[in-house]
Image: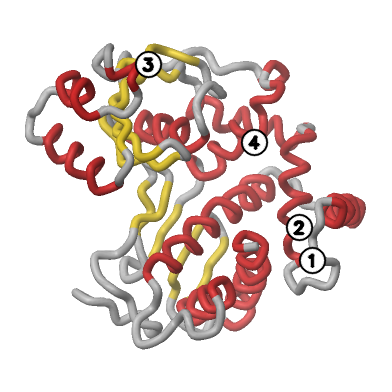
Amino acid sequence: MFVSRLVSVVFLAATAVSACGASEVALEVGRTTVDRTTLTQLVEDSFGPGSVGATMNTDGVVKVLDQMVRYEAVIDMLAEHGLEVGAEDLDAARDKLLVGGFDPEAAALSTLMRWQASLDLVVAGGDAVKAAYEAGADVVGHNLCTSHILVLEEGEALALMGSLRSGEDFVDLAEVHSQDPGSAARGGELGCAPIGSFVPTYERAVLGALSEGEELVGPVPSQFGFHVIRIDQPGAVEPVPFEALGERLPGVMLHLATLTREVTIDPRYGKWDNAVGRVLPPDGPTSPDGAGRGS
C-alpha cells in the first residue's frame, strides 16, 4: 500500500505546485516540481497521522522521495517524446488494478491508474517508446562487467567503501567479507553480462557509475543485502536494437528514465545519488519547515 498511497499524493503535488507555486521547492525531477509543504503532507499520508512531529521522519522522507523520483522520471520521459495516457489506457489500467485486488473506493485509484497506464505504454512499446530508447541508448549501451562484495548491513558496506578509498585491495576484502561464496572465491569477480542479468538496483548502479565515470559504487541495496561494486573492463558496446530488447524493454526503459532526467532535491531532505540511483538521507534530522540540522 505504500506505493499506492504515495502515487496518489505525488500526482496531486505535481499539479498543485504548478497551480499555486507558493512555497520553496523540495524536489525537481524533469519538469515536475514538488514544494516543501506538499512533501510534509505526503509523508503523513504515506506513514499515517502523527508521522511528522517536531522533526520529520527521515526514513519516511527518503522513501517517499525515492519513489517520487522513479515514477516521475518515467512520466517525464514519455511526455518528452509526446506520449501521454488516454482514456482507454486509463480504463485498461483500472481493470488491471481491480483484478489485482486494489480497493475500487481508494482515493489513490485514479492516480495509480495513470502510473499503471504509463508503465503499460512502456511495456507495449510503440514509436514514442522507441524514440525515447534510441535517444538514450548510449547510456545503456554497455555490457556489465563487475566485481562485488556482498554484505548484510549498510554500515559494513560503507566501511568497505572507506577501506577501498584508503587503498585496501578489493580482492582481499571480497575474499574475507563477501557473503556471496561463489564470487568471493574469485575476489568478487562476476564477469561480463548483458543488461537484464542482474537485479534492477544492482544493474542501475552499474549503469549510473558508468555514466558518471566512477569505478566504485555503493552501498547498493538489493534483496540479498548491500553491494559494493567495482566496475571492470568499462567500455561501450553497440546498443541493442529496440526491436531486439524483448522482455528486457521495461527494465531498460526504467533505467533510462532516471539516468536521463535531471534530479534536484533540497539538501535538507536528502540527496539524489545518480551513480547508485537512490535518494540518500540528509546529514541530520529534518523539521517540517525545512530547518534541518546544519542548515
Query: Earlier along the polypeptide chain: callout 4 or callout 3?
Result: 4
| Labels 2 and 1 touching (C-beta < 8 A) | yes
Q: Nearer the viewer, mark 3 or mark 1?
A: 3
Residue 110 badge:
1
Residue 132 badge:
4
Across and down, in percent, residue 209 comes to 35, 33
Q: Quadrant of residue 282?
A: bottom left
Query: Earlier along the polypeptide chain: callout 4 or callout 2?
Result: 2
- The amino acid type found where label 1 is placed reads Ser
SS for tag 3?
Answer: strand
Query: Earlier along the polypeptide chain: callout 3 or callout 1?
Result: 1
- The amino acid type found where label 4 is placed reads Ala
Marks 3 and 2 sit apart, C-alpha to C-alpha, by 38 Å
Badge 2 density bin: few <14, some 14–19, many ≥20, Cα 10 Å: many
Q: How many marks?
A: 4
SS for tag 4?
Answer: helix
| Labels 3 and 1 touching (C-beta < 8 A) | no
Marks 2 and 1 sit apart, C-alpha to C-alpha, by 7 Å
Marks 3 and 1 sit apart, C-alpha to C-alpha, by 43 Å
- The amino acid type found where label 2 is placed reads Arg
SS for tag 1?
Answer: helix
Residue 114 badge:
2
Question: Residue at label 3?
Answer: 190
Marks 4 and 2 sit apart, C-alpha to C-alpha, by 19 Å
